[in-house]
Amino acid sequence: MVRAICFDLDGTLARYGGGFRSFVGLLRHELLLESDLDRVAQLLQEEIARDGPLTLESALTRTLGRLEQRPPPDLPELVRSAVRAYAADVRPTEGAGELLARLHARGVPLALVSNGPVDIQRASLASLGFERFFRAVLISGDADVAARKPAARIFSLACAGLESLPTETLMVGDTPEGDVAGARAFGMQAVLVGDAAEGERLGVPAAADMRAVDVLLRERFAL
Ligand SMILES: [Mg+2]
C-alpha cells in the first residue's frame, strides 16, 4: 500500500528549457570570464553536484576560485538575476500540474525531493506554482537538509515530513541511482520515470512521463 508520494523535480515534474550550457554562457558573460565555456560548464557542474549546503552563489564562488578569479562585488545581485532567469525558463512536464492537483485534492500527502542549489530549486518551484501541493520540500542544498539523493537522510526527512512510513511511501523520479536505488535502499517503494527495460533492470515499475505515472498510480496503487 502507498499512502504518500515523493516526487523528483528535474526531468520528472519539470524541465529547464534554456539548456545548462546556455545558462553557463549567460553567467560567463555576466562575470566577464575569459575561460573556455566548456571548462566553466564542467567546473560549475562539479560544484553543483557537491554535498552539503549549496546555493548558486556558493557554487559560483568555488568555480571562480578554481579558475583563479576573484568574485566580483556585485556577485549576489548577479546571482539573483541569474536565478530569476533560470526559474523563468523552467517548464512543467506534460501532465505534471494535473497529476499533482489530482493527488492533492485526493488528500495524498506529497513531498518534493530534489538535488540542487536551494536558491535555484526554490525559485523554480515558485515559478511552476507547485509549492502549494507539497506538504514537505526537501532540497539537497538547503542547509537543513544538506544531503543528496541517494543518501538515506533526505528520504528520511521526507518521510518524517509526510508522517509516513518508508514502506508506505513511493518515490517517483527519473534517476536510477539517486531516485530509485536510493529510495529503495531506505525501504521505500519507487517508480522510474523512464523506459520499461530500465525499470525491469531495477525491479520497479516504469512510466514514460507524468501522464503514464498518473495511469500507473490509478491502476496499480489505487490512488
Ligand atoms: Mg531528476
Image (tube, grey):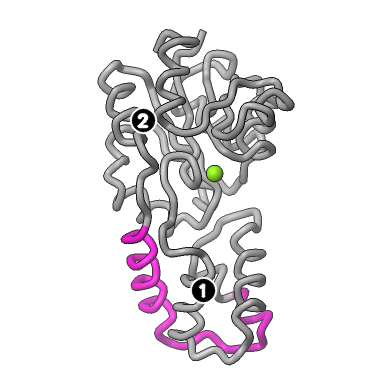
Residue 72 located within the stretch drawn in magenta: yes
User: Residue at position x 35%, y 51% from top?
Assistant: 91
Q: Residues within 10 Å of mark 2 (few under 14, many from 20)?
A: some
Q: Earlier in the sequence, mark 2 or mark 1?
A: 1
Q: Secondary structure at mark 2?
A: loop
Q: Separation of disc 2 and disc 1 at Cα? A: 32 Å
At horizontal 64% and vertical 21% (from top left) the residue drawn is 204
SS at mark 1? helix
125 vs 5: above or below: below
Q: Which mark is residue 3?
A: none
Residue 147 sits in which quadrant?
A: top right
For mark 1, does the 10 Å Cα neighbourhood hold few (<14), some (14 to 19), or many (20 or more) residues? some
**Does the magenta stretch mainly form a helix, a strand or a loop?**
helix
Q: Quadrant of the C terminus?
A: top left
The numbered dot on residue 135 is: 2
Amino acid tagged 2:
Arg
Q: Which residue is mark 1?
A: 24
Whether 59 is drawn above or below 28: the answer is: above
Residue 11, x across and y down, in percent: 50, 45
What's the magenta region?
62-89
At horizontal 68% and vertical 28% (from top left) the residue drawn is 197
Spot the residue most to the right: 201
